[in-house]
Image (cartoon, rainbow, N blue to C red):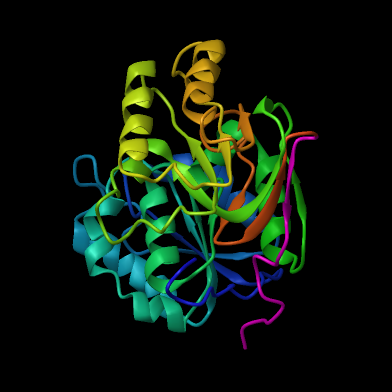
């Protein structure tokens, strides 16, 4: 499905160094404290990026500063995983300047969601790296450490796993297999027409968003359909779409797009913005079952190898 062979980053172990960077919007130190303390209590050594607390308007510092932190974490042999502090906006501005060869030579776990979707997708497309759509450091104060514990279990455990999706509703029942790809709907759609969006053919596509009126979700999904990206997906998972309107209206909209695709469709899955944010690995083959509902990872998302 990808032009590059898929690379699974080495698994995480207690005592490892984990990097924390702000590649998108600015964040205050106090907002990060609960998440940083959680990582410390879990036995990891936290290294905060040099520019993680920078602020330049709606960005966490200028493009060069945010890019430097990104490259520094991938270059540092001691850093085993990279957590993002928050989303916001800014990652699309640095995609063209990322040294993807550096990433490929130094694979490590990269975690985030929302605006970080642009980085997750580009890392898969340009470096073949499995990355993780999951909780960010600032989010732990809002969702609690349960979701972070599930994330760490995924990062620490090689092998097949089953991810339960409690609360998700089956709009079109069934099962499907495919490569997991997705993220924030608005960000993903803005990569259409660029070289940073992977092929969605045969994928289990997952989408989420927050604070978008129903007509904008309609417009964005229509854009994806007109661009030919929904025609050959194998399954669709929609998140909770927080503050986007009534659930019934969102379900009706999704059903309208999906009914002609004849693929299984879940809505209201606990991913992305919301009270729960289950981590999903991008670039890993999985089986979607709408009864349950669940995702069974059919291959490892991390390597059993460890950094030396």
Viewer-nearest residue: 130 or 289: 289
Compared to 289, does 249 lie above or below? above
Residue 288's spot in the image, x, y percent? 69, 45
Viewer-nearest residue: 27 or 290: 290
Residue 18's spot in the image, x, y percent? 55, 66
In the shown orientation, is residue 83 left or right of residue 12? left
In the shown orientation, is residue 299 left or right of residue 222? right
Compared to 295, does 123 lie above or below? below
* Residue at left offset 53%, top offset 37%: 272
* Residue at left offset 43%, top offset 27%: 210
Question: Which quadrant does the C terminus fall into?
Answer: bottom right
Compared to 191, does 292 lie above or below? above
Count of residue discs: 0
* Residue at left offset 75%, top offset 65%: 157
* Residue at left offset 50%, top offset 12%: 249
Residue 133's spot in the image, x, y percent? 53, 50
In the shown orientation, is residue 10 left or right of residue 99? right
In the shown orientation, is residue 177 left or right of residue 194? right
Viewer-nearest residue: 37 or 196: 196
Observer able to see residue 113:
no
What span is colored magenta in the figure?
292-308
The image quarter in which residue 74 lies: bottom left
Observer able to see residue 104:
yes
């Amino acid at each position: 499905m990808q032009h590059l062979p898929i690379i699974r980053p080495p698994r995480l172990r207690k005592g490892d160094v984990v990097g924390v960077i702000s590649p998108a919007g600015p964040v205050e130190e106090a907002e990060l404290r609960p998440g940083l303390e959680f990582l410390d209590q879990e036995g990891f050594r936290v290294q905060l990026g040099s520019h993680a607390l920078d602020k330049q308007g709606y960005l966490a510092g200028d493009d060069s500063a945010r890019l430097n932190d990104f490259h520094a974490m991938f270059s540092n042999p001691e850093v085993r995983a990279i957590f993002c502090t928050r989303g916001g906006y800014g990652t699309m501005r640095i995609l063209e300047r990322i040294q993807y060869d550096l990433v490929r030579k130094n694979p490590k776990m990269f975690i985030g969601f929302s605006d970080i979707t642009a980085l997750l997708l580009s890392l898969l497309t340009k470096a073949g790296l499995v990355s993780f759509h999951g909780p960010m450091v600032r989010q732990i104060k809002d969702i609690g450490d349960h979701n972070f514990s599930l994330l760490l279990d995924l990062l620490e455990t090689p092998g097949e796993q089953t991810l339960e999706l409690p609360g998700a509703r089956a709009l079109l029942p069934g099962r499907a297999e495919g490569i997991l790809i997705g993220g924030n709907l608005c960000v993903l759609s803005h990569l259409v027409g660029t070289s940073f969006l992977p092929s969605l053919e045969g994928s289990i596509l997952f989408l989420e968003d927050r604070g978008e009126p129903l007509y904008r979700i309609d417009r964005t999904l229509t854009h994806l359909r007109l661009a030919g990206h929904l025609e050959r997906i194998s399954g669709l998972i929609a998140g909770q779409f927080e503050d986007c309107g009534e659930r019934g209206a969102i379900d009706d909209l999704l059903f309208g797009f999906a009914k002609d695709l004849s693929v299984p469709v879940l809505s209201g899955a606990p991913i992305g913005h919301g009270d729960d944010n289950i981590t999903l690995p991008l670039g890993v083959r999985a089986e979607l079952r709408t009864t349950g509902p669940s995702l069974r990872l059919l291959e490892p998302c991390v390597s059993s190898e460890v950094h030396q």
